Amino acid sequence: MDYLKRLIKYVDECRLLIFAGLILALVGIFCNMTVPKISKHIIDDVLVAKKFGKLGYFASIFAGLIILKAIVAYFQNYIFEYTSQKALYRLREQLYTKLQYQSFEYYDRASTGAIMNRMVGDLEAIRNFLNQSFVQVVSIAITIVAALSIMLSMNIFLSILSIATVPLIFLNVKSLAKKLQPTFKAIRTSFERLTSKVQENITGIRVVKAFGNEDLEKKSFEKVAYDFTEKNIKAADIRSVHNPVAGFLNGLNSVIILIVGGYFAIKGKISIGTLFAFVSYVNMFSAPIGNIQNLVNQWQNAFASLEKVFEVLDSDVTIKSPKNGVVLKNVRGDIRFENVYFKYREKFVLKEINIHIKPGEVVAILGQAGSGKSSLINLLARFYDPSSGRVLVDDIDVKNIKLCSLRRNIGIIMQEPFIFSDTIAANIAFGKPDATDEEIRIAAKLARADEFIESLPDGYNTVVGERGVGLSGGQKQRIAIARALVYNPRILVLDDATSSLDFETEAEIQETLKEVIKGRTTIIITHRISRLVVDADMIYYMHGGRIVEQGKHEDLMKIKGRYYSTFKKQLIERANTLPA
């Protein structure tokens, strides 16, 4: 019920509309309750009494009620659809905002399929609940009370007979709800796995085809899809037992009333019209009770979704921008790592890191995969916080700097640049949406991307495919470089920015980067020793989360340690790739 109370707050601003919708629901119920009375008069006062002159009068009232009911239904449906969509908009906006501000640590645990399901499937279940279930609960309650009151006023004995099966119906509903709750939760979880599987397969379809693994992936998908199907069948199996029971109890009720009521009509204790009207009211009374089962299905489904949505909204954001954080101005680019330790998933990936990078210096950080070099950048940009120690920019702890200010001053060029399905201009201006065309062009020229962009059919307005489909690796990397430069950051980070490229393309990008890094504090994260690394002001070699060697290229070559071995090995590899 706590989830329901929280959900109600999202429709609070539409409470007047909801009140109007409930009034309309009452009018609709009044129309329904009046129709059997008009039918009674038509049967008793017109057909039985053979006073056909009154038929037009009662028929006009009957038609008027039907028209009024149709008009009321239109406005009622519109109001509740409007209010449910408004509530859903607020809920979706808050959910998306929460996801935007979540830390890397959250996304390390969450699957894409689960997140997509929160934003689409779970929210749709909540919308159905707000749009249909809420008003149905009110309508059912009022209809049951009104129908029972009229029935009692017509015949107390028949009314008592009518409610004889109600306790059995409620027991059936209670049993259904108890069984469905865990089943719906399991269905939601299984659906998330199914969504994740589809998303992962479509994203990696080129890898699947490259290895000819279509059949293997098909079998893997079948397992997940089968599990989802089985859980839905289980829910259907539960309903298939309880729904016929409810139908039988309602049918039994009607049969009893027809038998006893028919006997009373034959004996002249009640009129035929009264019996007809009473049976109509019995149906109005028992049908909503039967609909409670459908409501239980919807409610259990909605509450399973509410639990998952609020679970996201209630999740802690571990990396928060300080309320009174420092806004960096005139950044020099002085960076310090002071005795930094960093634990990731209960394992230390950085230990005793002490680095000082002076303004304008170029520093290279080398190491094999898993050595901890990329973790340094994650701490600098505050994607994670160190377990102990400090990271400072211009002598200010990054924890005390506003996140947007910190990250706006750090340009990160990653190994696998993400290109959005948008124009090239929009991709370059992603870090600075208000960038002028001139600023975009300047950044592209610095990245040596201007020439190939201009050769495209629509130039900077060319829309690229998802993840940059249609662009070469070098072209995507140049766009990524331009994106990092468009807001002119004082600190530049190259996180294995060229290691995924072939040697020829890498050499071209390296030449571009030589111009780009001038006057900027630059950190080069790599496992490949390039010209930029050789010319760096300082080189740190990492192994097992520690800095095991440091110095300039010449110094490290003299000591003949890990750096020396890596350099020699890569020289041989490069020589072997050259044509004979």
Image: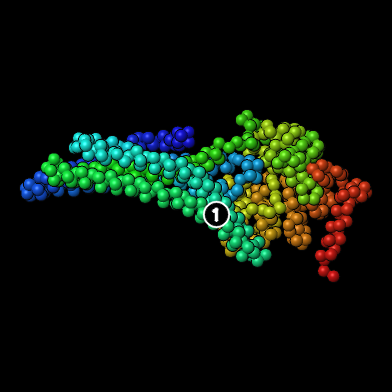
* Element at label 1: helix
Pointer 1: what residue?
A: 227
Corner quadrant of residue 174: top left
The picture quadrant where one finds residue 355 is top right
Estimate the x, y position of residue 101 in percent, counting from the top left: 59, 40
**Number of callouts:** 1
Q: Position of residue 56 (x, y in %)?
A: 11, 49
Query: Measuring 88% from the left and 56% from the top, which residue is drawn there?
Result: 568
Residue 445 visible, this orientation: no
Residue that lies at the very extreme toward the top in this rendered image: 324
Along the line of sight, the residue nearer the viewer: 479 or 74: 74
Q: Nearer the viewer, residue 230 or 477?
A: 230
Name the colour scheme: rainbow
Above or below — where is 209 with respect to 307?
below
Question: Residue at coordinates 20% horizontally, 43% vertically from top-left?
Answer: 260
Judged left or right of residue 82, residue 37 is left
Front residue of this view, candidates 444 and 349: 349
As drawn, 469 above or below 513: below
The type of residue carrying mark 1 is: Asp
Crowd class of label 1 (few under 14; some 14 to 19; many from 20; radius 10 Å) = some
Would residue 291 be seen by someone viewing this image from the given angle?
A: yes
Does residue 560 appear left or right of residue 483 in this picture?
A: right
- Residue 534 coordinates in the image, percent (x, y): 84, 51
Q: Quadrant of the C terminus?
A: bottom right
Residue furthest to the right? 558
**Looking at the image, which residue is at 57% across and 55% down?**
224
- Residue 328 in percent (x, y) is at 67, 35
Q: Residue at x 42, y 37 (%)?
A: 11
